[in-house]
Amino acid sequence: MASIFSKIVAGEIPCYRVAETEHCLAFLDINPVAKGHVLCIPKQEVDYIFDLDDELFVELHRFSRSVAKGLKKVCPCTKVGVAVVGIDVPHAHIHLVPLNSPSDLSFTHHVTMTPDELADLAQRIAAAIEL
């Protein structure tokens, strides 16, 4: 069965897309832990990030770095935090979260954003990313 992320890649489920290459996709998390929380995924469905082949593993990380640089331009923060959890969705993904303190990377609290706020933020981040 296809993961929710594979359905997003296939266009079956909409997302707030911020960047895309031939093999990777970045979009806003709709249940963000901070404003600007982005998920970077390989388009190929692989459950565990360490099962990605070497080439795709490196490509996903390079892609995530470009997205993080654009994200930092739009969402003022000290740093962009990186997390790989891999429990909730059986599809490799990297969380990019704007941080001002270590506690900002807590998956126990979330911020609420309207669809209009998410769409506006996605457009601004997308415009700031250089791939």
Image (cartoon, grey):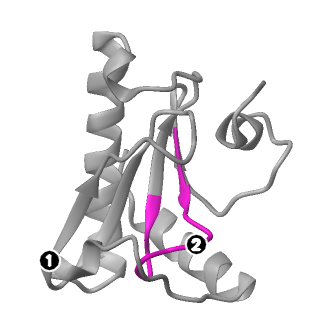
Residue type at mark 2 is Asn
> Nearer the N terminus, badge 1 or badge 2?
2
Query: Do labels 1 and 2 touch, CB within 8 Å?
Result: no
Quadrant (top left, top right, bottom left, bottom right) of the N terminus:
top right
Look at 55% across and 26% down and name the residue there.
22
Residue 104 left/right relative to 52 = left
At label 2, counting other C-alpha atoms closer than 10 Å, the crowd grade (few under 14, some 14-19, many 20 or more) is some
Dot 1: what SS? helix
**Which one is in front, 123 or 110?**
110
Residue 92 left/right relative to 115 = left
Look at 78% across and 34% down and name the residue there.
10
**Which one is in front, 101 or 85?**
85
Point out residue 35 in the picture as x, y percentages from the top left corner: 44, 82
Q: Quadrant of residue 102?
A: bottom left
In the image, residue 70 above or below residue 22: below
Magenta part, dominant SS:
loop
Point out residue 23 in the picture as x, y percentages from the top left corner: 51, 26
Task: Tell me, for residue 31, which label it has, or none.
Answer: 2
Residue segment shown in magenta: 25-38
Task: Tell me, for residue 102, which label it has, or none.
Answer: 1
Point out residue 39 in the picture as x, y percentages from the top left corner: 47, 54
